Amino acid sequence: MVNRLTSALEALPDRKGSPSAEQLEAFSGLGREGLRQFQEAWQGLEPACRRRYIKNLTEAAQDDVQLDFDGVFRLCLSDPDPEVRVQAIEALWENRDGSLLRPLMGLLHDASAEVRAAAAASLSCYVDLLELGRLPSPRGEALKAALLGLVKDDNETIEVRRRALESIAGLEQEDVREFIALAYRAPERQMRVSAVYAMGRNLADSWQPMILAELHSAEPEFRYEAARAAGEMGLAEAVPRLIRLTEDPDRQVQLAAIWSLGQVGGEEAKGTLRACAEGTDAGRREAAEEALAEIAFRENPLNPLLNIA
């Protein structure tokens, strides 16, 4: 292991193409000493090289779930280059380790707006833990205050504010709902789009009329978010419109509607999904098959295959 790590570290500055799978694997599961050696070598690389390498590590981890580069990604949260910091945040997206909460919250004050936005978005999983009562109160309250502080900060960029809103929307609390309602009336289009997303994440019944209305929006981005929100909330009233949206001019809206029909279920939804699954469009077929499988599981979790036909 030491020899392999040493060899991989020596190859880090190599700019002649992508690293080999073996070189990347050498950085999986590094202990304290291995991470110290990695950091020492990493600091000597040019920013462009570090960006390229962390992208390689991220892609390798996505292809092989056995690989664990989280130690490396944690180090990269403090990289001097903002693009590397953003990539590190995104690479740690599925990690809900409590020890990550403090550094991620620290990045809410990063000099780079892109880093702040990425950090705000990544904290959504900790908001979910807070809503479930699985995040200790002092840290949970600090998290809520930090995200709401960003949402309220008129001097902050729209991108950071909207990502903070989307994350905090997971709390089913009255003050959070008030901020979602304010965002829905905001003059900035992107804040309104995020408000529709937040409605689906927040799950309050009071959002249903707005979601149903946005399914008819002239703007595809609003239709897309409304379709996703309808699925998140399981709105049976949305099924007729969702069926029509499976033929929307916008491809992403089509796929969102198909996904949502799988979340809502019912005979009408299944009929439309079967038709999509028998079509010639490979992307729509795959999405419809996954949606039908979701319905089957919900109807018979012990043997979902019985309900697909």
Image (cartoon, rainbow, N blue to C red):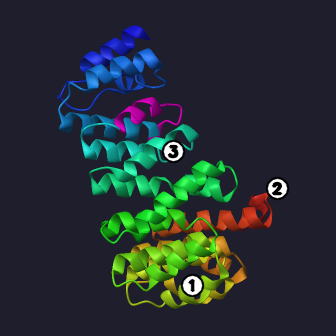
Q: Is residue 74 magenta?
A: yes
**In the drawing, does residue 260 fall left or right of residue 104?**
right
Q: Please state which of residues 274 and 181 is positioned toward the viewer in this rendering.
A: 181
For label 3, the SS is helix
Q: Which residue is mark 3?
A: 101
Report the Cα–Cα distance between label 2 and label 1. 28 Å
Q: Residue at x 60, y 63 (%)?
A: 290
Pick the quarter of the image with the N terminus: top left
Question: Which range of residues does the magenta coloring cover?
Answer: 62-77
Q: Quadrant of the C terminus?
A: bottom right
Q: Quadrant of residue 155?
A: bottom left
Q: Residue 106, percent across and down?
A: 41, 46
Q: Could you tell me which residue is drawn at 67 percent across and 63 percent down?
A: 293
User: Could you tell me how far apart the alpha carbons at marks 1 and 3 are, in whole angstroms?
Assistant: 40 Å
Residue ID for mark 2: 302
Can residue 34 be found in the magenta stretch? Answer: no
Mark 2 is on which residue type? Leu
According to the image, label 1 marks what residue? 243
Quadrant in the picture for residue 61: top left
Residue 175 appears at what percent x and percent y? Answer: 58, 74
139 in relation to 263, above or below? above
Q: Is residue 240 above or below residue 45?
A: below
Crowding at dot 2, Cα within 10 Å, few <14 / some 14-19 / many 20+, comes out as few
Q: Amino acid at mark 1?
A: Ile
Distance from Cα at disc 3 to Cα at disc 2 = 36 Å
Residue 270: image location, x then y, percent: 67, 76
Q: Residues within 10 Å of mark 1 (few under 14, many from 20)?
A: many
